[in-house]
Amino acid sequence: MTRILSQLLQAPEPSFSQGVQRLERANGAPNHDIRLSTKVSQETKTKLRQLGLDPSDTTAEELYHVLQERVRADDARLTKQLRSRAATHVSAEAEVVAGMAHALQEAPGSKECFALKATSLRVIIRKLAPKKAMKQLGYRSLDSFLKHESPVAILAAAWVSESESWKQQLIASYKRLKPSDFETRQITILHPTSKKWRELAENVVARRKHNLLSFKELGAIVLLPLPKDVPAGAVTASLSLALHELNEIRAASTFLKLSQVRADFGSLVQVVTNDEPLLRSDHLDQAVPWRIIQRYYAHLSDGFRDELFGPHIRVEDMSWQAIESVLSHFEPSFDFWHDSAHLGLLHDGKPVSLNVLDAALNLCNQLPFEQRLARAFQQALGHELLLGYLKRDTVEQTILNQLQPTLATEAVTA
């Protein structure tokens, strides 16, 4: 069964199997790998039946194309819903990105975050003037730029306009930040629409193949304008990625809140900005992504310990929302994708993903069966494997015992 997981994850061997064996030994051999493999197989067959397919007589390529048509139809309905939402709540133009921004603001789950203050970001921007971004958006002076654009919008424009050297200088400046430079506020969702922003977005979206910018240290998501004729699946992919980033911002927020007592707080802001914080665990014999801890406690209603997380963290801070569940909150047809993020069918050593993000990306990029993506599925399956061991009492206790000492002494980067 470990071999099946290894193939689905396309993990390197023999290191993957050896790692699972160590997890099993450390937790009293619960056979979680076998149970997870069986669960994935059974639930994938159930999804095939929901699609009207015979699990015993359906090829992987047939499943792939049926999933493409399914997400195509769901994407069309979602696009219609978002345009309607924009016309009702935002503007008469009914632009899909405006509807997307409104949907994110109304999405289930906490929108509170611990993020860099606008005043502190302005200080950084004044010292590191983003001249290319100013030119792109038609500003002649930094004062005018700061007056007419929000600091988040300025950083977004700079991030896609300035050089790598400028970005590195920005991140280097974060090392001097203190907890007093941060505040608790609502997550920011921006969708700039001016003519200059549209011109900037046109080049950026064409180059990056998506319209999303996310800044965990700012607690902000910026949605760039999309071209009028977007390919099928692009709206679902964009909104799914944005929902993923909402979860990432929530996780980064709780980590930074807990890190306020650290002398190297600024260095931890750099870690959050560049990648994600990881915590070491002897029982798991590997570094544990903080997002796993976040997700674990989000689904452990009676397991939150005030003595561990207080006074900075409340139980509602440990929010995590399944992407497909939130999508169905906006468009009910996405109910089909519930609990499918970690499901896949193995074919010649490579999975066919039932993850809605993979399906949408495959569709909007018009990828043939042989070039199909499965990264979101593999990440979700890997998290399911690790979460299963976190539920074991001995491993949980190890994580809880080491959490505060790790935060107090060492931040681990990927």
Image (cartoon, helix red, strand yellow):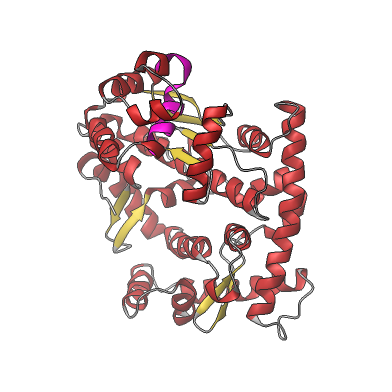
- One can see residue 319 in this view: no
Seen from the viewer's position, the closer of residues 378 and 254 is 378
Seen from the viewer's position, the closer of residues 241 and 399 is 241
Q: Position of residue 4 (x, y in %)?
A: 49, 80
- Residue drawn 43% across and 33% down? 156
| Residue 10, image quadrant | bottom left
Q: Is residue 191 left or right of residue 70?
A: left
- Residue drawn 70% across and 26% down? 90
Q: Is residue 351 left or right of residue 146?
A: right
- Residue drawn 53% across and 66% down? 373
Q: Which residues are magenta?
A: 146-159
Image vertical order of residue 344 relative to residue 247, above or below:
below
Farthest right residue in view: 52
Task: Give the main secondary structure of the magenta stretch.
Answer: helix
Seen from the viewer's position, the closer of residues 105 and 133 is 133
Q: Position of residue 192 (x, y in %)?
A: 55, 29
| Residue 9 on the magenta segment | no
Q: Is residue 62 left or right of residue 373?
A: right
Image vertical order of residue 327 relative to residue 93, above or below:
below
Q: Position of residue 248 (x, y in %)?
A: 46, 44
